[in-house]
Amino acid sequence: MIKMIATDMDGTFLDSNKQFDYEFISLFYRMQEKDIKFVIASGNQFLRLFHQFIPMSEDIYFVADNGAYVGKGAKPLYLDLIEPDKLQACLDVLAKHQNLMVIMSGRKHTHVLKKDEAYLDVVNKHYRNVILHDQFDHIDDDILKLAVYDPTSDIHQYENHLKKLVPDNMSVVTAGNEWVDIQNLGTNKGSGIRYLQKELHIEPEECMAFGDAMNDFTLLKSVKYGIAMANAVDEIKHIAYSQCPSNDQQGVLKVIRQVLDGKFRY
């Protein structure tokens, strides 16, 4: 029996227009009736995610910033902050790549350099409470993640390079073709789901998760029923329990409906 359903957002729950079908609202309340916990597991910032799901947000669990933030509704349950020395070491590496935009995702605010103001429309799709800075110094905030954006949509060319230069206790993971996320080693969507499994006394065999990109690898590995989108990268399809229709075909909602109707093939 499924007791928890988790989903990535971009490329998974949301279609290409960054929207979801309003059928989700009725499915969500059906999940509530069956006491199935619904989890948003995303690289996006918590505040952005919370606002997207009002008025249901207080009854949703959030694994935000790729697992660095775990909470229910507006209440944080767990935070994994980047230590100042690690943060500075990563910023020093990224400063050598002026063509890339760096976002510091903080507990209170989102921090972006003024030189990247032209990309604020991109920032606002994923983050809230944005502050522009001349430089990343003397910032009064707890930092959960660094998100690096490549305007040319070819972030994979930097992945291995950054892995070699950032501190050994930091992870570098791509999210689609435009983004790479840098955060504490061992912090990921899977670690966030495992935290919730422990706190809620739910076994991996009672959990389902949906994903499409490499930052969903640990998410799908943390549950028995990991579902890859039809538009997922091959690595995700290879580890998945099964596949579902693409994000533009509302594949997540179709599978959730099957679960609620007792028609999912276990």
Image (cartoon, grey):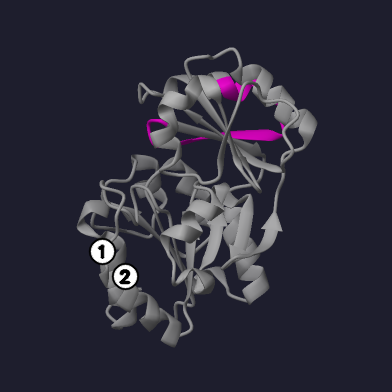
Residue at the image position 62 percent from the left and 59 percent from the top: 70
- Percent from the top left, x then y, of residue 257? 28, 75
Measuring from the top left, give residue 74's x and y in whole percent: 60, 65
Using the image, determine if residue 214 lies above or below residue 206: above
Magenta region: which residues?
Answer: 162-178
Is residue 128 among what the camera can see?
yes
Question: Which residue appears farthest toward the left when viewing the image?
Answer: 249
Residue 160: numbered disc: none
Mark number for residue 24?
2
The image quadrant of residue 134 is top right
Say if 37 sits above or below 160 in the image. Answer: below
Q: Nearer the viewer, residue 25 or 190?
A: 25
Total numbered badges shown on the rendered structure: 2
The amino acid beneath tag 1 is: Asp
Q: Is residue 64 magenta?
A: no
Q: Judge whether residue 169 is colored magenta.
A: yes
Residue toward you, 39 or 112: 112
Dot 1: element: loop
What kind of residue is marked 2? Answer: Phe
* Viewer can see residue 166: no
**Which residue occupies 54% across, 68% down?**
204
Distance between mark 2 and mark 1 Cα atoms: 6 Å
Could you tell me residue 155's position as x and y percent?
43, 25
Residue at disc 2, secondary structure: helix
Q: Which residue appears at 67% of the width and 34% of the height?
A: 170
Query: Looking at the picture, how far across and down is residue 42, in whole percent?
Result: 48, 51
User: According to the image, label 1 marks what residue?
Assistant: 21
Q: Quadrant of residue 154?
A: top left
Q: Quadrant of the N terminus?
A: bottom left
Q: Is residue 167 above or below residue 105?
A: above
